[in-house]
Image (cartoon, rainbow, N blue to C red):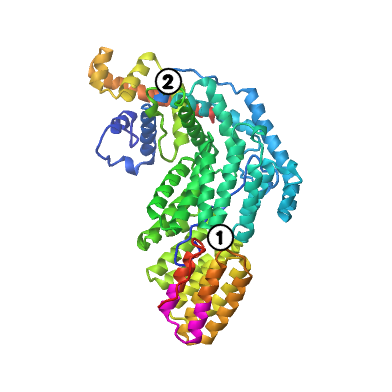
Amino acid sequence: MIIEQHYDDEVLIDLLEEAEEDTHVPVCDTCTGTLQSYRDLSSALHDNSVWDERELSETAKPETTNFLRAFADRTRAEDAAASAIVPKLIANPALIDPHPEWRTAGVVRGLLAIVDDKNFTEPKVAAEIAALAVRVADSLEAGQYPFDTVTKLRGKAWRTHAHMLYYVGSYNESIKALDRADDLLQACSVSEYDLARAQVVRAQLYNELERLDEAVTLADSASTTFRKFEDIDREALAEATKAASLVGARRYGEALPVFMRLGADRRIADKPRAFYIHNAAICSRELSRFEESKSLFVQAVAEFERLGLVSARARARWHLAQVMLDEHHYEQSRALLIELRNDFEELGMPQDVALTCVDEAEASLMLGQLAEVVRLCQRAMEYFSKASIAYTQGALTALAYLKEAAEGRTLTKQTLGDLRSYFELLPQQPHLLFAYPA
Amino acid sequence: MLDPNAAEVPPVVPESLAESGVLAGMDTSVVPHSQPADVGVLYVQYRDLLLHVACRKFRVPDSDAENLMEEVFLAYMQTEARVENTKAWLVAAMCNASRHYWRQQSRTESLPDDISDHSDPVSHGLADHFAVTLTLRKALRYLQPRCRETLYLHYYEGRSAVDVAREMDTTSRYAEKLIHNCLKRVREIYFSITAVKH
């Protein structure tokens, strides 16, 4: 029976068990809505919780309310006190020793907030502050806080530390920090969400280490968790991490649509979305869609600039310079690379300095200007001599070789490729010796 | 990570605590508007739903469920991430706490027989699903016992109309009608409850 051109409830309930598709429902909003509500209810009737006979108290417990409010008040007070301490501590971390009263959860939270502020603009500084946060967190007295508050805070501090170590290229240390974060978080009763965040960091790290299958598994697991918590940004991040694994496996055609979709999804926060646009640009470049790639890089550079993400902007411009190299626009590319090398020096990102040197040398080689390569090497060697990093010696040896090859006019693209591979490996293997090609 | 030949995946912005809702006394400009400042209000608002999840879905004893809820709210207060959907976050955290509870219990005593049923469905709308089951449970209380039994047999136990008829000592045609009418009736009650809520 049809009433006012809609199905009545009898018909709709019958449709619940019909396998065949009805022709009217899909074009009728009213009937679709009613049928859906019957579906939801009949599906919920399958759930055991609906039939549980137990009656539960429906009265909120004042002691719980009081406990939670007291915790919130205490935390607020601790954070307010920490806001005066944190700047002093950042200026002089040694002050933590004569001031044991500064060892509070509020100070740890304050330090981590600063890491969050600086992670893209001053990664090296952020990494140092994250290490300080770990030090303070590890020295907290757990008994002064309820449940597993301190354990979880320590886990978060270690995770942030791991993330920053990863960001500045200290991969081995990052893995150790993640192991520590996992151990701490797994001991907490409510930590699935935080563990998923650690999984994403680890998946990103594994992508770098070419442990792609493990990275995909971790990213999938994290994505599932974020979906449960309905965290759109982090679910997107986990998906993007998986797409990055596809990139690692050179499956650019599969990764591109994922990044394009995420980059266009306005529900996602501006910062990550800018990175997704950037990643889509990388995939386009790899698929030799240079015009599309340049357009996406320009879009990403503009977004990073708008958002004040200095190091990310620099890297997007670096990619742009590489597309120009691909297109044989050597002069334009080199001009951009020179600016970038200076930026990376200021940002304290030595591996990037070394790699831009190689690209710059390639542009100069293609222009037949080997004297420029010699000058470039001299400058880079001065930088590495002053920089106090684990792989200074290796970098200096490799740059000296590059300089000699340019002076002797024996420099080739193959040589530059070998140098690039070497500089890519250095942060993971700081004591790796540079082998002179035969 | 810094090799320009590799795609980069950034951290989602808040890797630390600047955006904590309940706790962010230091910078209110970043407090998401969806999170009320008073955690006590949140507790009152979501208590029934979270207890329902812990006790009825995961079979956590009432006496322990309130403690788990405290831990869930503490975790919520301490999360530095911007919580987009408070209800979803709390429900997912309650599921996490309940599973952890049983993991801990399994070290000292045997688990309930139906522990395998205690996993949460992995999909969007988990919180909404539990909210529906909580309200539906209330709606069922208003049904006639015969109607309740009909729905129980057909939907929960998955019995056919013929089976239901046999169980209730009636004809299958009447059992079919009963299933329809009872489902219709429980839907009416369900919507009258949610209408009152709103």
Q: Nearer the viewer, residue A192 or A45?
A: A192
Q: Nearer the viewer, residue A221 or A267?
A: A221
Q: Looking at the picture, how far across and down is residue B37, in whole percent?
A: 66, 38
Q: Quadrant of the C terminus of chain A?
A: bottom left
Q: Is residue A357 above or below residue A240?
A: below
Q: Is residue A250 above or below residue A24?
A: below
Report the number of discs.
2
Task: Read off the magenta span.
Answer: A400-418
Q: SS at mark 2?
A: loop
Pointer 1 with pointer 2, Cβ within 8 A: no
Report crowding for label 2: few under 14, some 14 to 19, many 20 or more residues within 10 A (C-alpha). Answer: some
From the viewer's perspective, tell me whether residue B68 is left or right of residue A26. right
Residue at (64, 43) in percent of width and height: A137
Mark closer to the observer (1, 2)? 1
**Mark 1 falls within which chain?**
A
Say which amino acid is labelled 2: Asp
Q: Can residue B11 be seen from the camera position used here?
A: no
- Circle on res. B51: none
Instruction: Name the residue beneath numbered marker 1.
Output: A168
Q: Looking at the picture, how far across and down is residue A426, in whole percent?
A: 50, 65
From the viewer's perspective, tell me whether residue B152 is left or right of residue A229. left
Instruction: Name the residue beneath numbered marker 2.
Output: A52
Q: Looking at the picture, how far across and down is residue A227, in whole percent?
A: 45, 43
Residue A226 lies in the magenta-colored region: no
